[in-house]
Every structure is written in structure tokens, then in C-alpha cells.
Image (cartoon, rainbow, N blue to C red):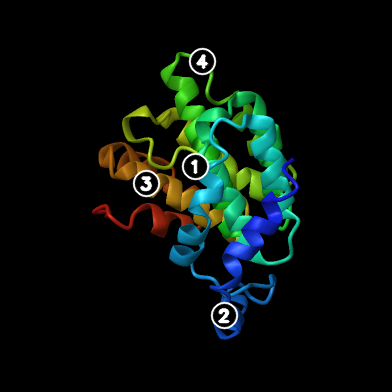
Amino acid sequence: MDGQFLPHIQAALADSADAGRAASMRAYMRGQFDFLGVPTPARRAATRAPLSALKGAGADALLEHACALWQLPQREYQYLALDLLAMHWKELDASHLPALLALAQRRAWWDSVDGVAAIVGDLLRREKTHGRDAHGSMDAALGHADLWVRRIAMTHQLGWRGDTDAARLFAYALALAPETEFFIQKALGWGLRDYAWHDPAAVRGFLAASGERLAPLSRREAGKHLSLP
């Protein structure tokens, strides 16, 4: 890894750091993480050039840089790792899913996990468009001991619309329905609600047939944009 990458990134953020904003950001995240106090637009503007310069670096280098960023204490660096991977996700493939899921389990909270889920979704959607199995790894993830990996399994199809494997989406929802964890119940409803934008009748039918098996939070989230009895 280029030994100047991290110092360059840290210097790029230094001018935008704000201690007052950092305190409010820390409070919003329930005190779990330290922050520099750099808002998203400023972070992305300050680091666009060094992240863009990694185009063509290859998957191994990108993941190495992302892991190095992830180890830094302030939360903005995990966001930067996600910015990096999202910017260059086309250099990754399905063989890198274990590394992405491992990353999601470190310093895990909904913000970083959902960022990883979006990248996983991009990779698997591309697999599907090329006629390859896009979901085997997510079938395994659904039963993972870590709740955040299970959340990724439930949400990785967000935004897929017509490419969504609806049967799998509904099966995943039923598999996770007994869970009492807030972040799973929320993800379950979110996944269904997102698909309802594409096929409201299918989601309405699923809720009519199976909705009582869902937690009230999941059912409420799933039906936000539907006319339900």
C-alpha cells in the first residue's frame, strides 16, 4: 500500500474538522464513535481526488486501503472506506464478498453496515445480469451469527426493482420474522417497502398472507406506501 495514502487523506480532512460538529455527530451515534466533525459533502469534496486516483489499482489494493481506513478511530474514515469501495466497486467481484462481510462486522453499526450492503448489492446484481448465481452467499449470510450480516442479507436487493428475486425476498423476511432485534425488524420492513415501489400487489399479497407473522414494526414499515386493510 502507498505509504502516503493515509497521511494524504488525513491532511485532506484536517481543514474541515469541526469539534463542535463532532460532538453532535458523536451524540447522534449514541456516543459509540469519535468524529472529526466533517459533514458528508465536505468529506467527499476533500477526498475525491485521492480516491479517484486509485482507479485501476485492483481489488486487493482497494480492500487494503479500505481496511487501513477502517482501523482509524474517527468514524469519517470508515465512511471514506465505503466511499472508496463504492467509487470503484466494478473492480471487485463475488470472490470479494467474504472480505466485505468481514469488514461490515468491524466497528459495526447501521451506518457502516448499510454502506457495505449497497456495495454487496451492486456486485450481486451484476452477477445476476450475467446469468450467475447472485444469492448463494446471501443464503449463508441469512443464518450468520452476526446480526449485521443477517441485515445485509435482508437489504442487499434494495433498489433492484425488476431484478429482485421476490421469492427469496419473501422467504428471507419469513426466516427473520421471529427475531426481536430492532435492526433486523427494521431491515425486514425496509426490504419489503422498497420492493413495494416496484410491485405493490406482490407485497400487499405477502402481507395479507403472512403479515401477522411479522413484528408490528416490520409490518408497519413494509406497508407505509400501501393501502392495507
The disc placed on residue 18 is 2
The disc placed on residue 193 is none
- Of badges 1 and 4, the one in the foreground is 1
Tell me where residue 112 appears, x and y as whole percent. Answer: 60, 55
Q: Which residue is mark 1?
A: 87
Residue shown at 74% from the left, 65% from the top: 73
Amino acid type, label 4: Arg
The vertical placement of 72 against 51, above or below, is below
Provide the secondary structure element on which disc 4 rests.
loop
- Of badges 3 and 1, the one in the foreground is 1
The disc placed on residue 194 is 3
Tell me where residue 123 appears, x and y as whole percent. Answer: 52, 30
Foreground: 217 or 162? 162
Amino acid type, label 1: Met
Tell me where residue 111 appears, x and y as whole percent. Answer: 56, 59
- How crowded is the residue under tag 2: few (<14 C-alpha within 10 Å), some, or many (20+)? some
Q: CA distance from mark 2 to mark 1?
A: 26 Å
Residue shown at 65% from the left, 24% from the top: 95
* Residue 18, quarter of the rendered image: bottom right
The vertical placement of 120 against 66, above or below, is above
Amino acid type, label 2: Asp
- Of badges 2 and 4, the one in the foreground is 2
Amino acid type, label 3: Asp
Q: Earlier in the sequence, mark 3 or mark 1?
A: 1
Q: Which residue is mark 4?
A: 132
Q: Give the quarter of the figure containing the N terminus.
A: top right
- How crowded is the residue under tag 1: few (<14 C-alpha within 10 Å), some, or many (20+)? some
Residue shown at 34% from the left, 54% from the top: 223
Asked whether residue 154 appears in the rendered view, the answer is no
**181 displayed left or right of 126:** right
**204 displayed left or right of 144:** left
Provide the secondary structure element on which disc 2 rests.
loop
